[in-house]
Image (cartoon, grey):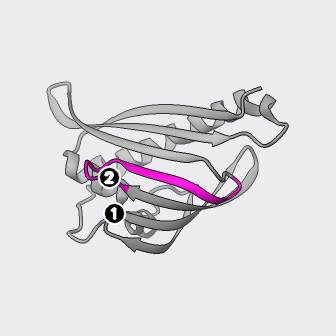
């Protein structure tokens, strides 16, 4: 049975690459404006290209709390790894590329989520994969709305 579930999702956002990278990395903005109503974040430490934060979410009816370490590469890619909690060892990766769609400039966001299935519960992998895809699709649309409709503007100090 599968021990790891991997979900990939891609979304195009009509906003410049620097703004999209900044918004995805801006944990304080996500908290202050409640970008993702189903997620609860708490920033524990932050540096220009690193952060440590907790995230709470309900998935498959189970409340999950994880401690994440975030790194941001020189190209703006974001890597979040759960180091403690329900999804320990799981990760979220975000990559950003300039892209045009319908004659409009924007940014393509590639999201990859990897989660470990609980021991002896590999049979849950298809259900977990389906639920994670549903949730990541909703969250990506919330970020798209924040950037395109609310008009997120990068703060000069916005980092990890």
Q: Position of residue 12 (x, y in %)?
A: 31, 34
Quadrant hosting residue 7: top right
At 85% from the left edge and 37% from the top edge, which residue is drawn?
Answer: 120
**Circle 2/circle 1 CB separation < 8 Å:** yes
Q: Which of the image's four quarters has the C terminus?
A: bottom left
**Horizontal relation, residue 65 to residue 158: left or right:** right
* Residue on which the image places disc 2: 73
Q: CA distance from mark 2 to mark 1?
A: 7 Å
Dot 2 crowding, Cα within 10 Å, few <14, some 14–19, many 20+: few
Q: Which of the image's four quarters has the N terminus?
A: top right
**Horizontal relation, residue 115 to residue 51: left or right:** right
* Residue on which the image places disc 1: 49
At 77% from the left edge and 43% from the top edge, which residue is drawn?
Answer: 118
Does the stretch in magenta take in 150? no
Q: Magenta-highlighted stretch: main secondary structure?
A: strand
Q: Secondary structure at mark 1?
A: loop
Residue 88 vs residue 150, the one in the foreground: 88
Q: Is residue 123 above or below residue 157?
A: above
* Range covered by the magenta-colored residues: 72-86
Checking the image for residue 39, the label placed there is none
Give the residue at the far bottom of this rendering.
Answer: 44
């Amino acid at each position: 049975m599968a021990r790891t579930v991997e979900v990939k999702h891609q979304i195009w956002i009509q906003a410049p690459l620097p703004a999209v990278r900044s918004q995805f990395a801006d944990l304080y903005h996500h908290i202050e404006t409640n970008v993702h109503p189903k997620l609860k974040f708490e920033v524990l430490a932050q540096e220009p290209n690193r952060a440590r934060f907790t995230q709470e979410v309900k998935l498959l009816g189970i409340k999950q709390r994880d401690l994440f370490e975030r790194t941001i590469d020189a190209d703006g890619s974001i890597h979040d790894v759960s180091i403690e909690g329900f999804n320990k060892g799981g990760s979220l990766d975000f990559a950003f590329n300039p892209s045009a769609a319908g004659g409009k400039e924007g940014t393509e966001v590639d999201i990859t989520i990897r989660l470990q299935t609980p021991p002896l519960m590999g049979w849950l992998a298809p259900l977990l994969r389906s639920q994670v895809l549903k949730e990541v699709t909703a969250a990506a649309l919330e970020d798209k709305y924040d950037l395109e409709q609310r008009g997120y503007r990068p703060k000069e100090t916005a980092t990890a």
